[in-house]
Every structure is written in structure tokens, then in C-alpha cells.
Image: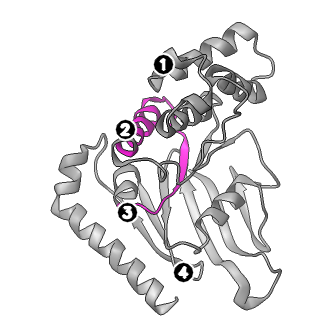
Amino acid sequence: MNKIMVDNLKFSYNNHEENKYVLKDINISILKGEFVSIIGSSGCGKTTLLNLLAGIIFPLEGSITIDGEPVVGTGSNRGVVFQHYSLFPWMNVKQNIVFGIKQVERTRGKDYIEKLAEKYLELVGLKYCCSMYPKHMSNGMQQRVAIARAFAMNPEILLLDEPFSALDVKNRVILQDLLLQLWESENAKKTIVLVTHDIDEAIFLSDRIIVLSERGRIEKDFKIDFNRPRNRKELMRSQKCFELRNDLVSILDNSNSLGI
């Protein structure tokens, strides 16, 4: 069943100037519970597309629907994890998560919300950090808090904008594994859309990879049919993964050089 539908979408920050479109002729259908990554060169419109899905900005032409309903703004059915954590610096870790939960659980009592916050902090390995403030935490720890908050708010859709790009390789791998662990442990998987520059990250995490060209068009839509749960080492060493990675690199190189 389709969760997200993008139909004939066009977007520009300069109204309808043909040569100023950031995104053009975008058609995407994403299934409920599917994990989709969007890759492409800088400036191709990846983050713009994510912001359109979030309801922060709106298409000039075409439509976006979720469960058949048009996107007319932000909503509690979508959670966003940004590249730079977006934690409130004046709140400690637990307060940051409690604040997020309160936005969607308005009828729940204090005890329920605090226990839920503690549960997700424990799942991301930070229960001992409840009283710490963001400025006292590493980048990786802050991003764990942001991920915990997003899952604790329990949106149907998670929109992730390069959430691991500022991290070192070790922490990036840890948080990729954590993201999959949280996603796969749920009875009803969230629908996830991830923007990333990292091809290996996209291959390891995704059910599909959508490649955007430099001119904001869909260049290719790959189905990633590796079995889950995935073994990172085995997958990355496989011939099939090697060939897929080469295909993706080749498409990105051709798209950029031709300006397609």
C-alpha cells in the first residue's frame, strides 16, 4: 500500500522560470514501511524534496499525498531528524525528549511521558545521560538523542536529512546500525526517507535508492533486494554490492558531467 505519493512535482524558489526549477517532473511512490534513500550531487534538490515531504515548503506544480490526503503543512505523522541535531540547548537530554513527546501525546500523564523518554534513551544507550545538556555531549551522542526523540514521538514517517554526515566513521556505523535496530524492532515499521551523500550508507540501509540528477530530475530508481537483517561485512564484500555501487557511481558521474 502506498504511503507517500509524489505526482508531477515541480519546485522553484523563483516561481515559474523554466531554467530555475530546483526539482522537475518528480514522480515517486513509497510503500508503507519502506526505507528509501535519496542520493545525488550537492544542489540537486535532495533536501528541498525532503522539506516538501515535511510540509515546510510547497510545490509550484503537482502534488504530494500521504495516505491519499494532500500535504498542506507539517504534521505529527511526520518526524524530521536534521544533520545538526536540533536539540534545545537550555534543556537536558530527558527534557528534550519529553518536550517532543508532549507535542503528540497531549492526553498522557507526566509519568507515562517520562517513562517513554527513558525507554528510548535506554534503547540508544544514553539512559545514564538523562541530566546532561547538549553542550556537554559529543556529536554522536547528540544525534542519538535526536533519533531517540524522533522514535519516541512515534510518527508514521521519518524524514532524515543527512543525519550522520557530520560524524566520524565509527560513530556513523554505530548510528546506522542503531537506526536499523529501532526500525526493524517495531511491529509496524515506520516509512523512512533518508537524504545522504554516502552511497554505502544508502545501500546498507535502504529498500530503494532514488538518484537525483544535477538538474533535479529522477535519474534512476534502484530496488535494493538484499535480505534483512543485513550483515554489513558480508553485504559490502559481495559481488552484487560491488556492481550496484559501481552503477550508482557511474550514474552520478554521468549526470553531473552531462548536466542532465
Residue that badge 3 annotates? 199
N-terminal of the pair, mark 3 or mark 1, is 1
Q: Tell me the CA gap for discs 3 and 4.
A: 16 Å
Which residue is at a point 82% across and 55% down the rendered structure image? 72
**Which element is circle 2 on?**
helix
Residue that badge 2 annotates? 174
N-terminal of the pair, mark 2 or mark 4, is 2
Look at label 3 and name its amino acid. Ile
**Which element is circle 4 on?**
loop
Residue that badge 4 annotates? 214
Q: Position of residue 12 (x, y in %)?
A: 75, 77
Q: Position of residue 150 (x, y in %)?
A: 61, 35
Look at label 2 and name its amino acid. Ile
Look at label 4 and name its amino acid. Glu
Label 2 neighbour load within 10 Å: few <14, some 14-19, many 20+: few
- Labelled disc at residue 5: none
Q: Tell me the CA gap for discs 1 and 2.
A: 15 Å
Looking at the image, is mark 2 or mark 4 nearer the viewer? 2
Q: Residue furthest top?
A: 111
Look at label 1 and name its amino acid. Glu
| Residue numbers of the magenta segment | 172-199
162 lies above or below 17: above
Residue that badge 1 annotates? 122
**Which element is circle 1 on?**
helix
Which residue is at a point 22% across and 52% down the rendered structure image? 235
Which of 208 and 248 lies nearest the eye of the viewer? Answer: 248
Q: Tell me the CA gap for discs 2 and 4.
A: 31 Å
Which residue is at a point 58% across and 17% down the rendered structure image? 130
Which of 166 and 57 lies nearest the eye of the viewer? Answer: 166
